[in-house]
Image (cartoon, rainbow, N blue to C red):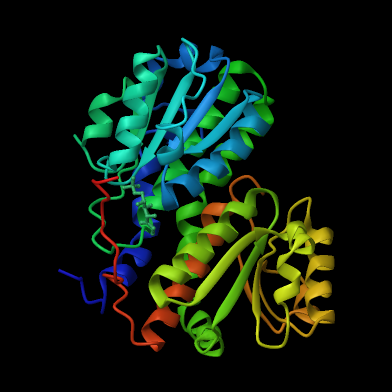
């Protein structure tokens, strides 16, 4: 049932070219430059005219929400907030009729997320579910939405469900931006095309497994780690840190790279590996200077970069160079090496990667 892989986690990481393809299939038509998601067509005007979008989720799904916030605000120009379901449900939040609530959940059964959206629905919000498990509670509460089509995820740590969430959220954002005319035809066409190349690029990253395993070997004895990224890659830094802590039990923190100066930099010494998500985007020069600041304090730098980057390898102790895409789509690629890194570090430390201690696949109690 593990299809020849040692663990479900590895199997699910390797399934991603297919699961992402399955999410895009029948919805994205890159040749024509069109996106059609049956679950949202009927609500297109409501979504497009929503005064505000509030994204509600937990854990890894919340990280997908943060990325969606950046993408939706950039492309659709609709204000977005992202909330932890557990906070939202108890804090008497302001919800207006017509607000769009987006619930993101692999299982569709996370207790806090269910209660949060039920509450928002009572207040007149429209609920959009981005869910993996077909027929789950969250999918039933939602009026509109899209399944991620990642197939059953057995490993407790979310991997293929996360990239499925990103693929679905990206399609929805681009579709709405196109509908609202907040991006040009050319930009929309380009984003559709880049999205269609993702499965093949993920495949190429997976072929770097041995190289990533070798980097993991150099990190396995760390007691603490820092993950840094800016912009669309800031949530990927958070996700990289979450994955590492749950899989390997190594203490890991994710931060927006520029925030390190406001505290975390005090931790930096020769024993602290800092993992940068530093693929090419508008922040590239800035993140390189953050890297130099770490090196000046003797920190060890590992960087996820793009192929063809000749500057970063001169600064970092190790780089993992992956294919380039549009900066908006990059997070879906950039998380893959971090998933593999966590897996190999967990295995090297003898951890039960499919079932980390104290964790449950779906958190049905608050
Ligand atoms: C981390 C992980 C959890 C879940 C979270 C939400 O790898 O799997 O953080 O993302 O418990 O679960 P869902 O998406 O089922 O609502």
Residue 8 horizontal side relative to residue 291, left or right: left
Residue 103 in which image quadrant: top left
Report the residue at 53% width, 44% height from top. 195
Residue 311 at least partly seen: no
Q: Quadrant of the C terminus?
A: top left
Residue toward you, 230 or 91: 91
Residue 192 at least partly seen: yes
Report the residue at 22% width, 76% height from top. 4
When the figure is inspected, residue 237 is found, relative to residue 172, above or below; the finding is below
Number of dots carrying numbers: 0
Residue 307 in which image quadrant: bottom right
Residue 74 horizontal side relative to residue 119, left or right: right
Q: Quadrant of the N terminus?
A: bottom left
- Percent across and percent down for residue 246 are 40, 68
When the figure is inspected, residue 136 is found, relative to residue 12, above or below; the finding is above
Report the residue at 29% width, 63% height from top. 359
- Percent across and percent down for residue 339 are 45, 67
- Percent across and percent down for residue 135 are 19, 34
- Percent across and percent down for residue 222 are 55, 85
When the figure is inspected, residue 268 is found, relative to residue 126, above or below; the finding is below
Residue toward you, 358 or 28: 358
Residue toward you, 201 or 321: 321
- In the current view of this chain or complex, which residue is farthest to the front? 91
When the figure is inspected, residue 29 is found, relative to residue 185, above or below; the finding is below
Residue 5 horizontal side relative to residue 344, left or right: left
């Amino acid at each position: 049932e593990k299809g020849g892989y040692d663990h479900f986690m590895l199997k699910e990481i390797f399934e991603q070219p297919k699961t992402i393809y399955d999410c895009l299939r029948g919805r994205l038509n890159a040749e024509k430059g069109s996106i059609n998601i049956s679950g949202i067509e009927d609500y297109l005007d409501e979504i497009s005219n929503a005064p505000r979008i509030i994204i509600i989720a937990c854990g890894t799904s919340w990280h997908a929400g943060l990325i969606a916030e950046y993408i939706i605000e950039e492309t659709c120009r609709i204000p977005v907030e992202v909330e932890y379901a557990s906070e939202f449900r108890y804090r008497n939040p302001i919800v207006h009729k017509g607000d769009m609530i987006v619930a993101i959940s692999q299982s569709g059964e996370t207790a806090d997320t269910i209660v949060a959206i039920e509450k928002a629905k009572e207040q007149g919000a429209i609920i959009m579910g981005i869910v993996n498990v077909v027929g789950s509670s969250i999918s039933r509460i939602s009026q509109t939405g899209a399944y991620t089509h990642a197939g059953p995820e057995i490993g407790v740590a979310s991997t293929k469900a996360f990239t499925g969430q990103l693929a679905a959220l990206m399609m929805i954002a681009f579709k709405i931006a196109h509908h609202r005319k907040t991006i040009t035809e050319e930009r929309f066409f380009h984003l559709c095309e880049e999205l269609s190349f993702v499965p093949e690029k993920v495949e190429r990253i997976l072929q770097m497994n041995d190289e990533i395993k070798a980097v993991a070997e150099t990190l396995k004895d760390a007691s603490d780690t820092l993950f840094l990224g800016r912009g669309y890659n800031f949530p990927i830094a958070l996700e990289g840190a979450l994955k590492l802590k749950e899989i390997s039990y190594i203490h890991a923190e994710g931060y927006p790279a520029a925030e390190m100066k406001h505290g975390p930099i005090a931790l930096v010494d020769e024993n602290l590996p800092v993992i940068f998500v530093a693929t090419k985007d508008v922040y590239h020069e800035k993140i390189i200077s953050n890297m130099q600041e770490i090196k000046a304090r003797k920190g060890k730098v590992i960087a996820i970069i793009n192929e063809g980057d000749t500057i970063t390898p001169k600064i970092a102790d190790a780089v993992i160079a992956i294919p380039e895409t549009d900066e908006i789509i990059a997070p879906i690629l950039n998380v893959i090496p971090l998933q593999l890194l966590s897996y190999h570090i967990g295995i090297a430390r003898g951890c039960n990667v499919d079932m980390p201690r104290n964790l449950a696949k779906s958190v049905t109690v608050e």
